[in-house]
């Protein structure tokens, strides 16, 4: 004897159950679709390292706000802010940030974290830069005519590089054959330096990711580090609603308050790749 299924014995109950489940799914989908969205322009380093992939779900869980971002150089990110294309910036070029604020485009800038810039190059170190200061490093590279790859994209890293050339008293060697202007992100710039057996300036966080990509044995190694001039500060800035009325300033402020809170600062400090800390929170400074 075959037993009839519960659904066949109680067709009305089965239909009601299907309708309830279906309605719940629809309502859930509507609720998800209505989650407020915060648009961010940020740097390639916060994206390449996986930091934002790590933080975004935590932010949404805490606030109900979905974070969407585009990762570009700081210069391009600031352009997005000036054009009102985003609601908030997460960038790392204090001078450009100051100009953004002075122009009335931004509000509520807060420091979040820092790491540092480093010079990397081939293990053989043909320009002999190991252990030199930042300025001495560039002088040695220029004197030797060693290959140097520049992001050349007005990113925070590129702006730091330009400032260091100036500090070294050297005109940016953009017409020299050994100076390669990449115009791409940090990982691509490091890869091209490796292909050409050359040097580049990078933020440490992205280099740690690069090391991990090469299973801890990358073609390029850290050769110059620790100079005070190489500090790399990251900050958040809300786009000023006085400039762009559709800027979601309320959502931006919620993100700012969340990311500088002690609990989130601790989460940032605990974010590591290959056991190495990538960023050091300093919202309290």
Image (cartoon, rainbow, N blue to C red):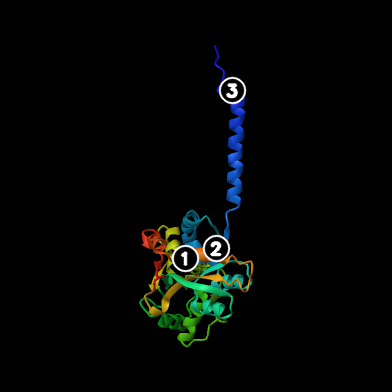
Q: Residue furthest top?
A: 1
Residue 281 in picture, x, y percent from top left: 40, 67
Q: Quadrant of residue 68?
A: bottom right
Q: State the CA–CA distance, disc 1 to disc 3.
A: 54 Å
Residue 209 in picture, x, y percent from top left: 44, 61
Give residue 251's mark: 2
Give residue 10's mark: 3
- Left/right placement of residue 203 relative to residue 4 reads left
Residue 94 in picture, x, y percent from top left: 49, 77
Instruction: Decide if residue 158 is in sight here.
Output: yes
Q: Quadrant of the C terminus?
A: bottom left
User: Is tag 1's residue or tag 3's residue first in the polypeptide sequence?
Assistant: 3
Residue displayed at 61% across by 47% down: 30
Residue displayed at 53% across by 78% down: 96
Which residue is the site of mark 1? Answer: 257
Instruction: Decide if residue 177 is in sight here.
Output: no
């Amino acid at each position: 004897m075959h037993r009839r299924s519960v659904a066949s014995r109680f067709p009305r109950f089965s239909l009601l159950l299907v309708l309830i489940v279906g309605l719940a799914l629809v309502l859930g989908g509507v609720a998800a679709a209505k989650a407020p969205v915060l648009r961010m322009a940020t740097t390639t380093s916060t994206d390449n390292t996986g930091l934002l992939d790590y933080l975004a779900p935590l932010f949404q869980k805490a606030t109900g706000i979905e974070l969407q971002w585009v990762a570009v150089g700081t210069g391009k990110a600031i352009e997005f802010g000036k054009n009102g294309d985003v609601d908030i910036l997460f960038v790392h070029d204090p001078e450009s940030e100051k100009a953004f604020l002075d122009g009335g485009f931004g509000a509520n800038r807060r420091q979040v974290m820092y790491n540092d810039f480093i010079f990397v190059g081939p293990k053989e170190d043909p320009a002999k830069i190991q252990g030199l200061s930042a300025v001495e490093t560039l002088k040695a590279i220029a004197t030797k005519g060693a290959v140097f790859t520049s992001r050349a994209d007005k990113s925070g890293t590129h702006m730091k590089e330009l400032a260091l050339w100036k500090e070294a008293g050297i005109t940016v060697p953009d017409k020299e054959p050994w100076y390669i202007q990449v115009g791409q992100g940090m990982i691509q710039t490091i890869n091209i330096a490796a292909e050409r057996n050359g040097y580049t300036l990078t933020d440490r966080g992205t280099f740690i990711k690069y090391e991990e990509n090469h299973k801890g044995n990358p073609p390029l190694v850290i050769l110059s580090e620790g100079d005070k001039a190489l500090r790399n500060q990251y900050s958040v800035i809300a786009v000023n609603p006085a400039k762009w009325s559709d800027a979601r300033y309320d959502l931006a402020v919620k993100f700012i308050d969340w990311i500088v809170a002690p609990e989130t600062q601790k989460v940032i400090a605990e974010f590591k790749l290959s056991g190495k800390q990538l960023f050091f929170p300093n919202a309290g400074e």
